Image (spheres, helix red, strand yellow):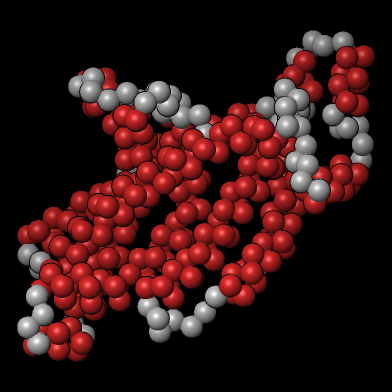
Amino acid sequence: MMSYLARRLLSLVPVLFAVSTLVFALLHLMPGDPVDLMLGEQALAIDRVELTQKLHLDQPLMTQYVGFLKGLVIGDWGTSIFDGRPVSKHIGDRFGATLLLSVCAMWFAIAISIPVGILAARKKGKMLDSLAMFVSLVGISLPNFWLGPVLILIFSVKLGILPFVGREHLASLLLPSITLGAALAAMLSRITRSSMLEELHREYITTARAKGVREWKVVTKHALRNALNPVITVIGLQVGTLLAGTIVTEKIFSWPGMGSLLLDAIHRRDYPVVQGVILVNAFIYVVVNALTDIAYKMTDPRVDL
């Protein structure tokens, strides 16, 4: 298993190289000048030239690219064009908030979807099953940029029971976590139901019931464990979607995470910060996918890595 994990981590190198190259090219081909954004269009020509030289924007694009790659190799991600702070400092200040929000959203999705999926499978064809699948369909259909403001209007503006701005205390996590995790919970509940239905009709389940094993044990210990692999697959694949979803969610709730940092950096043409945030997201995505494959082996010993 360790050799497999090492191979997967080595595969990060070409992936990060491709991502960094693509992001560098797209950002530098976008219209707009960061010098204009920082000094304004009415700035003196001498000030513009001085700032352009300071930011190395007067160098050829290939020279800037080579310097960027050298910085990645030695761990120097550069400094922000906007305020001169190291990119690593920017990301370090915001990463914890995004990680906390993503983990809470994921746990919310799992805590809701697994029991709902199991219950729907156990009550197949009955009203409870139809209701659960209808709610999950609605959850998948609602985009977070609509759900977030609606939750704010109901629970913060009308009822006044939950905060919705910033990261002041634990209650501030509730609405953003629901907004971010609702679609994932709906998707996982449908996957869990489908996978559980397949397992509950297998012969080993019939054998376990014939031996007198209690129903809750048949469902949770036998069927659920073998039904988890498709669920784990979806969770691993949705990590990227979850990280991307934080961009909109953090903006709606003024959450001080990497999503807000990325939007602000794009608006200011702050190339080093944008590249740093996207590289961190790419790294997390690849690592989580490797851990997902290892989770297969933990839940199902028959899986060969």
The residue nearer to you, when weighing 276 against 23, is 276
Q: In which quarter of the image is residue 113?
A: bottom left
- Name the residue: 14% across, 84% down: 208
Asked whether residue 211 is in view, the answer is yes
Q: Where 101 falls versus 47 (above or below)? A: below
- Residue 41 location (% of width, % of height): 78, 15
Q: Where 226 falls versus 123 (above or below)? A: below
The N terminus appears in which quarter of the rendering? bottom right
The residue nearer to you, when weighing 246 against 206, is 206
Left or right of 53 in this view: 242: left
- Name the residue: 28% across, 31% down: 151
Left or right of 196 in this view: 37: right
- Residue 77 location (% of width, % of height): 75, 41
Q: In which quarter of the image is residue 7?
A: bottom right
**How many marks overall?**
0
Left or right of 32 in this view: 252: left
- Residue 221 location (% of width, % of height): 22, 73
- Residue 304 location (% of width, % of height): 48, 83
Left or right of 61 in this view: 30: left
- Name the residue: 49% across, 70% down: 293
Q: In which quarter of the image is residue 296?
A: bottom left
Asked whether residue 148 is in view, the answer is no
- Name the residue: 55% across, 56% down: 285
